[in-house]
Image (cartoon, grey):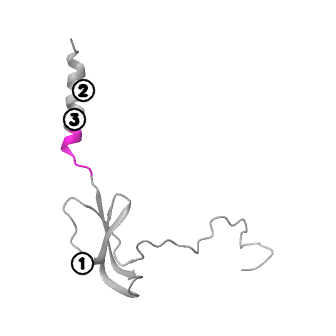
Amino acid sequence: MQKPECLVVVLCLASCLCGQPAVTVTAVRAARMIDVHSGTVVANAVVLVEKDRIQAAGDGLAIPAGARLINLGDATLLPGLIDSHTICCSTTTWRGAATPP
């Protein structure tokens, strides 16, 4: 025979998991977005990300109900691009360095 305490714990965990659906879509909103395909600047940009992939990007896209919203205000988005100019392995410090920048 099973212990009633185990059943109570299982039911509590199940109600917690069922009561709050997992957020799978994140909407990132910003004032502008650089569209690298067309070479244009898009106003009122929204980028929809599902799990770890960009699903849609454009101006004024509808944000799905229940999506996590990140509002970047007056920022400019570069979806899919990274800062390739960052020097992350540099061992030189510019202040006091032998060679000026």
Q: Circle 3 sits in a helix, a strand or a loop, which is it?
A: helix
Rendering coords of residue 67 (x, y %): 25, 61
Q: Amino acid at mark 2?
A: Val
Rendering coords of residue 27 (x, y %): 29, 66
Mark 3 in CB contact with mark 2 (< 8 angstroms): no
Q: Residue furthest front?
A: 37
Residue labelled with disc 3: 14
Q: Is residue 47 visible?
A: no
Mark 1 in CB contact with mark 3 (< 8 angstroms): no
Q: Amino acid at mark 1?
A: Gly
Which badge, 3 or 2, comes first in the chain's sequence? Answer: 2
Q: Is residue 81 visible?
A: yes
Residue 18 is left or right of residue 41, and the answer is left
Rendering coords of residue 44 (x, y %): 29, 80
The residue drawn where x is 33% and y is 84% is 42
CA gap between label 3 and label 2 equals 9 Å
Which badge, 1 or 3, comes first in the chain's sequence? Answer: 3
Task: Using the image, tell me which numbered label, if any, was put on residue 60.
Answer: 1
Instruction: Judge whether residue 15 is colored magenta.
Output: no
Residue 77 is left or right of residue 97, and the answer is left
Instruction: Judge whether residue 18 is colored magenta.
Output: yes
Residue 73 is left or right of residue 78, and the answer is left
- Span colored in magenta: 16-22
Residue labelled with disc 2: 9
**Quadrant of res 53:** bottom left
The residue drawn where x is 19% and y is 36% is 15
- Residue 98 vs residue 24, the one in the foreground: 24
Mark 2 in CB contact with mark 1 (< 8 angstroms): no
Quadrant of the frame with the N terminus: top left
